[in-house]
Amino acid sequence: MHSLYAARRVALPVLLGLAGCADDPTASFDGLPVDQAGPPLAMTSTDVRLNRTVDITVSGANANETITIGLSVNGTGAGDCPGYLGGSCFGILAPVQLLTTVTTNGAGSGAKSVNVPNYPSLNGRSVCFQAVARRPGPDVLATPVCVDIGYDTDGDGIINSKDLCPTGDDAFDWDEDGLADACDPTGAPPQFDTYAFPTSVTQTTFQTRNVLRIIPPNPVGIVWFFHGTGGDAGLVESPEGIHLLNAFLARGYGFVAIDSQNRSTGVFDATSAPASNQDWSRVNALRTNLINQGLFTANTPTFAIGFSAGSSFVSWLGHVAPGAGWPLEALAFHNHAGRSAQYGAAPDMPIAFLPAENDTTVDPATVVQRYDEHIHNGFTGILLTIEEERFAPSRLAVSPDIDPATSAAMRQATIDAGYYDAQGYRLFPDNQIDQAIDDIAALPGFTPFRPGKKGLTAMLATHVLHGQHAEEEADFFDLYR
Ligand SMILES: [Ca+2]
Ligand SMILES: [Ca+2]
Ligand SMILES: [Ca+2]
């Protein structure tokens, strides 16, 4: 890296004189046609940030060409026409000094970030640059570029004199009102805290299957959770599941989650009649067992939430359980249309349908269609679409394994890799969401990747249990207890 400080002591003519030596590789271009057919040589420069960098780009050069960047602190105008320019003249005023050189790629473009020392006397001044392409015959010079010199205290690339928010990165402007988050008390991104799993949970087994439950004294209702294909009762321990659970616990509900009978597929049986359905037998017996323990009564209002294939069983349950004495009041289908092979259409009871807008496993349009049919048939329901969220800096901190600073660093890794912009909008198309989740999880800076991937998946509204509508879901159940 060349430094501006060093450059001020090295006169450009010295460099250009050296470049004209016999062993200069550019000498071999002598006699070749001059390439002037492409776009004109051009350059850009950021402002010069003292004690940081200045970033230069060049374009319109030949492939793999070394471009010299000259500088002047005396502005632009009709400059010197030294002999080494082969008849060309500078457009910046003498003395012209060397900043750096930039080597172009195969497309004739190049970029360089040049370290700039702390040079207080340059603060507030300006400087002009001009790119020079050494060519046989007259050298080719780009139009000069003049920029300002100053300090960039917050390191966001904007010098203090132009920085709208000198105490924070101006690229981070969550509400997009032009004022960076650090200077915008009303426009900061939402803050996410860990969704902590209640310590009062009881983990037990019933007829060899795992059960997780919390049942407060005199519960206002009992919510049964049924996992999807390949899942288990631990579904409720994911951050999103905890978020959902806590909404019910805060209102005085208890919950029960149990593993499915089939542990190889992890699918609850929604295809068999009650007499031969082992999931139903166990779940019904568990309920009786819990009533006999005095944890709730036979009249405690009961609800059921299914995720994905678990919703098929919840739908099945809605057809069967009321006839077996369950006061089953309302259901919720997450990421599923809520039909069972045994009974088909959803039962005649209040149902919350929760499609996720980017779900490629269960088409959200199908879920909406089932909701419409439910309403059309005269039944009660609510549609709570899970919507994609912007990537807030602390979004992944909902996991107990990720603190807010780590979440912000993981988010930055997705920005640096081009998956998200600083406002938290994704930069990949809809049809690449599932692939992008895998790719992001593999980024070196996206660590710890496993809980990070879960949070990312929830944020992108794909096929995963979501707590996004936890309060509305609890509000809905409250109507029927
Ligand atoms: Ca700044
Ligand atoms: Ca700033
Ligand atoms: Ca703002």
Image: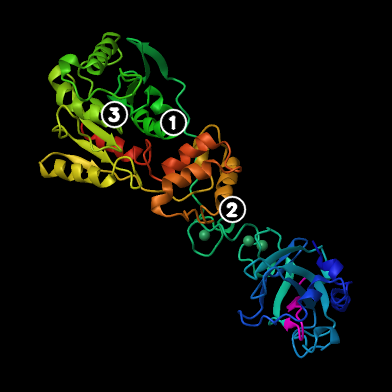
Per the image, the residue denoted by label 3 is 310
Q: Residue under label 2, please give it.
A: 416
Answer with mark 1 or mark 3, whichever residue precedes in sequence. 1
Classify the position of the C terminus by image quarter. top left
* Residue at the spot 87% in from the left edge and 79% down from the top edge: 13
Of the two numbered discs 2 and 1 in the rendering, the one whose residue sits closer to the viewer:
2
Highlighted range, magenta: 123-140
**Distance between mark 2 and mark 3 Cα atoms:** 38 Å
Residue highlighted by disc 1: 238
Q: Amino acid at mark 3?
A: Gly
Nearer-N-terminus badge (2/3):
3
x, y (%) of residue 118?
81, 63
Amino acid tagged 2: Asp
- Disc 1 secondary structure class: loop
Residue 242 sits in which quadrant? Answer: top left
The circle on residue 415 is none
Q: Mark 1 or mark 3, which is nearer to you?
A: 3
Quarter of the image for residue 70 reads: bottom right
Three-letter code, disc 1: Ser
